[in-house]
Amino acid sequence: MVQQDIERAVAILRRGGLVAFPTETVYGLGADAQRAEAVERIFAAKGRPSDHPVIVHVPAGADLGRWAARVPVAAERLAERFWPGPLTLVLPRGPRVPDAVTGGQNTVALRVPDHPLALALLSAFGDGIAAPSANRFGRVSPTLAEHVREELGSAVDLILDGGPCRVGLESTILSLVNDRPRVLRPGAITAAEIAEVLQETVGSGPGATAIRAPGLLDAHYAPSTPMTLVPAPALVDEAMSLHRRGSAITVLARVPMPVPLRPILGEGTKPVVWIVAPASSHAYAHALYATLRAIDRRQVERILVEEPPAIDEWTAVTDRLRRASHG
Ligand code: TXA
Ligand code: MG
C-alpha cells in the first residue's frame, strides 16, 4: 500500500506534478526541483509570489555537492550531526539549480527531512524535491494531511498521509554564506546547538545581505482570526476587558483559567474559551498550528496568546506567535 503510494508519487513528480508529503516539521508541497515549470506550479497552487525561494529536500547529506557550488566544512559537520532533521542549510547555489527554486538568488536552501515517508519518497525519486510548506501563502503551515486537503485540495495531484508531524514548526534555517553562520528562521534545532557543533558564534537575522525569505516577513504563519500576544501577567486583565466589551475571545494560555474568574469569564452570551496549551515547548510547538486552525473554525473575534518564557527553548514558538499576531 505505502509502496504503491510512493510509486504513484514518484510517477507524478517525474511528469512534473505536485505531491504533498509529510516531514517531521510540517507537510511540504513537492515538485521535481530540476524542472522549473513543475516548481512554478507550486507557486501557483500556494498563491505565493514567484520570486520567493523554496527549500530543496534531498535524500542524504552526501547529495549537498549536487546542489551547492561549494560545501563548507561547517555544512558537512551540521549535516552529519543533525540530518535527517529539522535544519535547513543555505549554501552557494550550484549550476543545476533552476531560477524558479532560488527566486533568482545566488544561494540554495537544502535539507534532509526526518520522516519515513519523506525519506522513502526522496530515495525512490532519487533526486531533489523542491517543497515549501503545503499551505496558501501567508497562512499557518499544515501539520496534518487533512489541513493540506482543506487548503489546497485539487491543486495537488497526490497527498501522502503520514499522520501528524512530530515537530509541528518549520525547520531552523541557517545561512552559511555570510561572514558567520546566521539563523534566518528559528526552529527546533537552536542556535546554541549549532554553535556547539561548529565551535563558533552563530548570529541571527538576515544580516547585511538582503535575503528574500517569506518566512522572515512580519505577517506570516497567520490564522485568519486577529491574534494578540500578551505578557503572562497582563493576560487575565486583557481577557477581562475584552470580555466586558462583549467580544468573543479565545485565550491560549499555559495555565488554567483562574478559579475566581470562572463565573465572570466563563459566562455571558460570549463566554471566553480558555485553552490550556502544553507546558513543554516541544509539545506546545507540536500542537500549535492545529490549535490555531481549530480556533479559526469557531467564529472568534480575537485570540489572546500568553507570551512564552523568554528562554532559548521557546525561541521558535515565540517567533511564530509574533508573526501570527502581527497587525
Ligand atoms: O520545515 C520546513 O522547512 C518545511 C518543510 C516542508 O521542509 N518547509 C518550509 O518551506 O517551511 P517554506 O517555503 O514554507 O519556507 C522556507 C523558507 C522561506 O522563508 C524561504 O524564503 C526560505 O526558506 N528560503 C528558501 N531558500 C532560501 C535561500 N536560498 N536563502 C534564504 N532563504 C531561503
Ligand atoms: Mg511556509
Image (cartoon, rainbow, N blue to C red):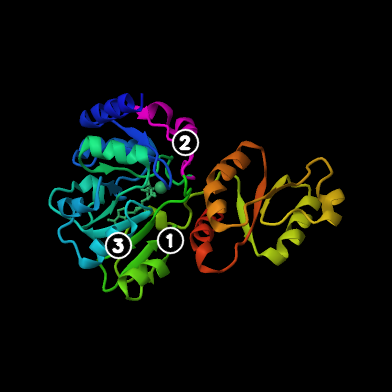
Q: Secondary structure under badge 1?
A: loop
Q: Where does the magenta region start and end?
A: 140-165
The amino acid beneath tag 3 is Leu
Image quadrant occupied by the N terminus:
top left
Q: Nearer the viewer, mark 3 or mark 1?
A: 3
Q: Position of residue 10 (x, y in %)?
A: 25, 30
Q: Which residue is mark 1?
A: 186
Specify the label residue 163 is tagged with: 2
Q: Quadrant of residue 229?
A: bottom right
Q: Could you tell me which residue is drawn at 32 percent across and 43 percent down? A: 131
Asked if one can make out residue 327 in the rendered structure from this viewpoint, the answer is: no
The amino acid beneath tag 2 is Gly
Near mark 3 (Cα within 10 A), the count class, few <14, some 14-19 or many ≥20, is some
Q: Nearer the viewer, mark 1 or mark 2?
A: 2
Asked if the residue under mark 1 is in contact with the one under mark 3, i.e. CB atoms within 8 Å, the reply is no
- Earlier along the polypeptide chain: callout 3 or callout 1? 3
Mark 1 and mark 2: Cα distance apart in space: 24 Å
Q: Position of residue 222 (x, y in %)?
A: 52, 48
